[in-house]
Image: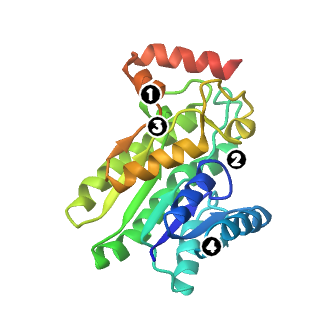
Amino acid sequence: MENVLITGGTSGIGYALARVFAANKYNVIIVSSNYENLKIAQQKLQEEFPVTITIMEQDLSQLKAAEKLYNNIQAEKIDIDILVNNAGYGLVGRTEEIDFYGDENMMILNMISLVELCKLFLPNMYEKQRGKILNVSSTGAFQPGPFTSTYFASKAFVLSYSKAIRFEAQKRGIQVCTLCPGATKTNFFVREGTKTPRISMSAEKVAEYAYRQLIKNKSIFIPGFINRAMQVFPTNIKMFSIARMKKE
């Protein structure tokens, strides 16, 4: 039975992905900074699916946290077949008004920890000549985001980085795929401090779509027809719409 490691796996898309993988008979290792939420998620998944659910408490918004997580995985002798870099959050406001350290921690979580986990787990996958990485970006990666500038830029980084390492890894039998969800019904918008858009997809639909595309080894996938269709609009129009939405 294969093992999948999911960061930010206690809620939203991360938890929905954990359910999908568990339903498809993967052992699941979920990572979060909140131990109580980890225990709740573990209990729910363990009661529902006959697989092993392992939890690891780690705040990936701190420097060196990715290395600590990797070392813990190695110490437990868990062989990771699929790495899902899902953990992330966004902040809204004018760039000079967003909390300095909140922005810094978000960049560490959204970019640095993601890169470091890829760098740490890829050599193991190369040695085995098998493995998959799913990096969660966003439709925000396809244009700048006024009033959510750092978050959108961080997701553009994830998309660019993932495309590059996919090119490197594919010749060695490793799949690197990128999920770019649009608005999703999760706690993301609550934490961000904005309203959940009416067109938001459910986390369950996003996760199911993502799993199918990952298994097919698609490079980049955007769940939802509306989300895909919106990408044809000119960048300036999309930026204007984002600015209006974030300022409401």
Image location of residue 83, percent across then percent down: 46, 64
Instruction: Return the residue nearer the eye: 196 or 239.
Output: 196
Identified at 58% across, 46% down, the residue is 204
In-image side of 241 versus 45 (left or right) = left
Q: Give the residue type at disc 4.
A: Ile
Instruction: Return the residue nearer the eye: 246 or 42.
Output: 42
Vertical order, 240 against 181 (above or below): above
Q: Nearer the viewer, mark 4 or mark 2?
A: 4
In three-dimensional space, the C-alpha distance between marks 1 and 4, rounded to whole angstroms, equals 33 Å
Q: Secondary structure at mark 1?
A: helix
Q: Which image quarter holds the N terminus?
A: bottom left
Q: Which residue is mark 2?
A: 101
Mark earlier in primary sequence (1, 2) = 2
- Classify 10 Å Cα crowding around label 4: few (below 14), some (14-19), many (20 and above): many
Identified at 49% across, 64% down, the residue is 24
Q: Which residue is mark 3?
A: 223
Q: Give the residue type at disc 1.
A: Phe
Q: Give the residue type at disc 3.
A: Pro
Does the image show residue 57? no
Query: In the picture, residue 132 is in which quadrant?
Result: bottom left
In three-dimensional space, the C-alpha distance between marks 1 and 3, rounded to whole angstroms, equals 7 Å
In three-dimensional space, the C-alpha distance between marks 4 and 3, rounded to whole angstroms, equals 27 Å
Q: Which residue is mark 1?
A: 225
Does the image show residue 11? yes
In-image side of 114 versus 87 (left or right) = left
Identified at 47% across, 13% down, the residue is 237
Do labels 1 and 2 touch, CB within 8 Å?
Answer: no
Q: Which image quarter holds the C terminus?
A: top right
In three-dimensional space, the C-alpha distance between marks 1 and 2, rounded to whole angstroms, equals 36 Å
Mark earlier in primary sequence (3, 2) = 2
